[in-house]
Each structure stands twice: as structure tokens, then as C-alpha cells.
């Protein structure tokens, strides 16, 4: 069984996938970390040195490789992953997909704290962040909404979100 977490940056995909991996004893893959490790560069450096097209092609290849695993896997993908190629269809075809849905104000608060680590928003003024996020979510929502399940994360702890996903996996299996 593969469980894939999708959603915008700041929804807690990495943190929640860690909790799930530990609780379920599934192998953990963070798509961005896999790509970063492969090139020994941060995602920001890959974008800067090789460009977005190179990154998206590598992302697709890495995604396909992980999705073809026979192991029990928790996969956390980047916020843009579902938008490119047929990635969302592949994710749905090969795994149980869960969209971690988080409100704009919650995302803005979380993302303000570590903007410099996120190339997409690093140069956006804090006061412009909610508008940027809202616009981006509007564009990406049609892809995120294709997920098999939607879990709202606002006003829930990461433990509560993880438990909800475990219940989904048990029902699905």
C-alpha cells in the first residue's frame, strides 16, 4: 500500500508523513528530499542551476519510480507535483491519495516563519503572502481536489491529522 500526501506548501505534508511512517511502519519518501539527495543540491539550487523544466522532469521520473514500489510507502510530494504532466492521475492510480487542505490564513502564518527556504515565496512581502497563496491555491485546487480523500488540517494537531489518515487507510484497505 502506498499513501501519498498532496497539498500546498505549509500544509504539514512532511511532518505528517513522518508521523504516519513511524506509526504504520511504512517506508518514508519525501519527493523533494529524494531529488535533493540525488543531485546533492537544495531544491532552490536545482531550480537556479538547472531550471524548472529540468526539475519537473526529474520530479516525474522520481515519482514514477517510487510509485512502482511493492513496499508499503508513505509518500509526501511537493506542492507543485500534482499540477505537472499526468502526475495526479499516476498518484491516484498507484496509491491512496490524501489532500491536506489548509486555509489561506493558516498557511500564510506558517509560511512567514521560513520563507527563505521556499524559493516560490522567498521574495514576497509578508503582507502580500495571503493574496499570493489564495491565487496559487485557486490554480492548483483542481489538481489537489482529484485526490481520493480530503483531510482538513485547520485547528487540528498533526497527530489528529495523522490518525484521520490512518483511519482512511484502514477503511480503504
Image (cartoon, grey):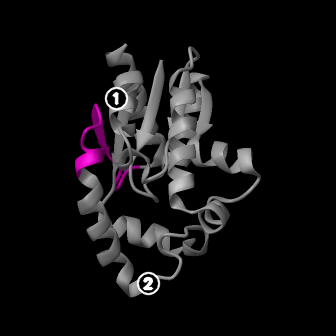
**Can you tell which quarter of the image residue 104 is in?**
bottom left
Badge 1 vs badge 2, beta-carbon distance below 8 Å:
no
- Label 1 to label 2: alpha-carbon separation: 34 Å
Q: Residue at x 56, y 53 (%)?
A: 55
Under circle 1, the secondary element is: helix
Image: 45 above or below 21: below
* Residue at figure coordinates x 73%, y 50% from the top left: 39
Residue 168 seen from this side = yes
Q: Quadrant of the C terminus?
A: top left
* Mark found first going from the N terminus, 1 or 2: 1
Q: Is residue 10 left or right of residue 152?
A: right
Residue linked to disc 1: 92
Nearest to the observer: residue 55 or residue 159: 55
The residues colored magenta run 142-156
Residue tagged 2:
126
Question: How far from the left and from the top, in percent, is residue 75?
Answer: 52, 35
Q: Secondary structure at mark 2?
A: helix
Q: Nearer the viewer, mark 1 or mark 2?
A: 1
- For residue 30, what is the image quadrant? top right
Amino acid at each position: 500500500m502506498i499513501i501519498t500526501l498532496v497539498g500546498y506548501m505549509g500544509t504539514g505534508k512532511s511532518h505528517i508523513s513522518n508521523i504516519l511512517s513511524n506509526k504504520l511502519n511504512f517506508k518514508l519518501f519525501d519527493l523533494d528530499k529524494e531529488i535533493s539527495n540525488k543531485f546533492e543540491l537544495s531544491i532552490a539550487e536545482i531550480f537556479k542551476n538547472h531550471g524548472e523544466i529540468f526539475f519537473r522532469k526529474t520530479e516525474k521520473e522520481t515519482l514514477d519510480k517510487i510509485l512502482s514500489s511493492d513496499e508499503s510507502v508513505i509518500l509526501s510530494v511537493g506542492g507543485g507535483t500534482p499540477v505537472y504532466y499526468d502526475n495526479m492521475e499516476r498518484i491516484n492510480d498507484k496509491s491512496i491519495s490524501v489532500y491536506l487542505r489548509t486555509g489561506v490564513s493558516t498557511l500564510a502564518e506558517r509560511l512567514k516563519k521560513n520563507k527563505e527556504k521556499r524559493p516560490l515565496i522567498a521574495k514576497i512581502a509578508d503582507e502580500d503572502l495571503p493574496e499570493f497563496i489564495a491565487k496559487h491555491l485557486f490554480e492548483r485546487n483542481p489538481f489537489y481536489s482529484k485526490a481520493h480523500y480530503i483531510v482538513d488540517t485547520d485547528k487540528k494537531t498533526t497527530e489528529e491529522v495523522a490518525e484521520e489518515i490512518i483511519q482512511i487507510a484502514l477503511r480503504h484497505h
